[in-house]
Image (spheres, helix red, strand yellow):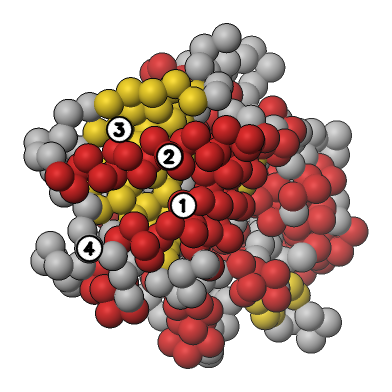
């Protein structure tokens, strides 16, 4: 056999094998099985999400579950996990995902991204559509990922989860999450910023530590792990039961200053219920109130409220004349009331509702002391701190700026 004949024969054999290789790969995908996933810990998850078109295998019929995943690949997985695949092969956003978004993000998808194809770009960088969309939805901060081809480590994935949860669900109580994650062996090797992300993913039951008790700070995330994380993110039934999920007895999801939501844990039923009382107290002022996190602000009128809530307004004119507030971390209740004409009269009913909940039968005693302190603040400046014991509480009245009177209410130590 001469050299030319050998080359031609080799080409014929190679070309003849390609359809066989493709058929083997297609058969593997169709059956939901790959040559390297049988018996793998994530095999069921891999099969489910491959069937949904979230991630594909390789032409040789393998899936390579333990290969590291790159940032661009993970973003594709993340976004596609919020979609459903139709029989004709097309995709659309899950209604549950759309409903979880803020109104601005819903409008973004329906207007700016109404023609989004969910497919990689065929011109230029294949992942650009996914990166642009994730950035516009505030799921990522592009400057934090200088190279989207880089392999992601576990704390970087936790960061992506943090911002995704912020836009689609709510964040857990930060102090509680950190306390819960303190059992992770290598948490201290992460930066303070990274700890926040790791603690959130851990508390949510989306990421977990390894059998050795370590989270795996600095360890690359694999393709199999990526699919498991994506499935837990979008299907709460797949999440790992944690102390945070079981701690809902005194938990309330509250709106945050940046327009999102987070879950707060209160120390007891009384304070948890006080949050609902604050909501009802605000309604006694019509629409002239704002409840954000654990502070209810009460405004003189609609114009003052509009100025106070305006992000561009920096003047001292826009202020709330009263506020009811809670400090769960310190088990403290509070009332702040500006010392000015009409402030007490306008806000007496909301304050009374709040006080009645806290003091019960002792509420009348607090009312009398409250009125006396307010009268004193109107006449005496500077106002000196005053203390009283009412029922099971120690109450402090102070006026740090001589413009508003602040009442701090703390349960007495047993």
Task: Mark 1 and mark 3 in contact? Answer it, CB < 8 Å.
Answer: no
Q: Is 87 on the left or on the right of 14, as rendered?
A: right
Q: In the rendering, at what x and y percent does residue 321 appear?
A: 28, 59
Query: Which residue is depicted at the point 52% across and 12% down?
Result: 413
For this rendering, which residue is in front, 295 or 403? 403
Residue under label 2, please give it: 368
Is residue 198 in view? no
Mark 3, residue position:
397
> Residue at image x 13%, y 39%?
380
Comparing labels 1 and 4, the label whose residue is closer to the camera: 4
Q: Which residue is nearer to you in this view: 113 or 385?
A: 385
Task: State how far apart marks 1 and 4 are (Cα).
Answer: 17 Å
Q: Assign the C terminus to one quadrant of the image.
A: top right
| 1 or 2: tag closer to the N-terminus | 1
- Disc ID at residue 122: none
Cα distance between the residues tagged 4 and 3:
19 Å
Question: Which of pointers 3 and 2 lies earlier in the amino acid sequence?
Answer: 2
Q: Quadrant of the N terminus?
A: bottom right
Q: With respect to residue 360, does 165 lie above or below?
A: below
């Amino acid at each position: 056999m001469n050299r030319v004949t050998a080359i031609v024969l080799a080409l014929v054999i190679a070309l003849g094998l390609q359809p066989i290789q493709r058929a083997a790969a297609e058969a593997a995908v169709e059956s939901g099985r790959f040559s390297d996933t049988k018996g793998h810990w994530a095999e069921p998850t891999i099969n489910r999400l491959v069937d949904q078109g979230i991630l594909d295998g390789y032409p040789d019929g393998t899936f390579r579950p333990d290969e590291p995943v790159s940032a661009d690949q993970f973003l594709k997985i993340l976004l596609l996990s919020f979609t459903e695949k139709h029989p004709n092969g097309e995709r659309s956003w899950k209604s549950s995902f759309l409903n979880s978004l803020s109104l601005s993000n819903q409008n973004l998808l329906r207007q700016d991204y109404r023609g989004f194809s969910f497919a990689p770009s065929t011109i230029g960088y294949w992942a650009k559509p996914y990166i642009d969309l994730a950035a516009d939805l505030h799921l990522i901060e592009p400057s934090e990922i200088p190279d989207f081809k880089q392999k992601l480590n576990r704390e970087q994935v936790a960061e992506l989860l943090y911002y995704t949860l912020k836009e689609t669900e709510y964040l857990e109580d930060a102090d509680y999450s950190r306390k819960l994650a303190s059992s992770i062996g290598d948490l201290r090797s992460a930066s303070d910023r990274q700890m926040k992300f790791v603690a959130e993913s851990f508390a949510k039951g989306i990421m977990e530590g390894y059998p050795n008790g370590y989270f795996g700070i600095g360890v690359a995330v694999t393709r199999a792990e990526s699919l498991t994380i994506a499935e837990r993110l979008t299907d709460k039934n797949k999440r790992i039961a944690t102390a945070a999920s079981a701690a809902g007895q005194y938990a309330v999801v509250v709106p945050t200053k940046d327009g999102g939501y987070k879950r707060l844990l209160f120390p007891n039923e009384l304070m948890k219920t006080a949050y609902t009382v604050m909501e009802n107290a605000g309604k006694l002022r019509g629409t002239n109130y704002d409840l954000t996190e654990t502070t209810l602000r009460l405004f003189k009128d609609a114009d003052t409220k509009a100025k106070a809530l305006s992000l561009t307004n920096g003047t001292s004119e826009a202020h709330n004349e009263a506020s009811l507030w809670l400090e769960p971390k310190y088990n403290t209740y509070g009332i702040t009331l500006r010392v000015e004409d009409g402030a007490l009269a306008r806000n007496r009913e909301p304050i009374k509702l709040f006080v009645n909940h806290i003091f019960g039968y002792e509420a009348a005693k607090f009312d009398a002391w409250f009125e006396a302190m307010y009268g004193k603040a109107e006449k005496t400046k500077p106002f000196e701190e005053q203390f009283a014991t009412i029922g099971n509480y120690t109450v402090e009245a102070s006026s740090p700026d001589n413009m508003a009177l602040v009442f701090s209410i703390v349960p007495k130590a047993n």
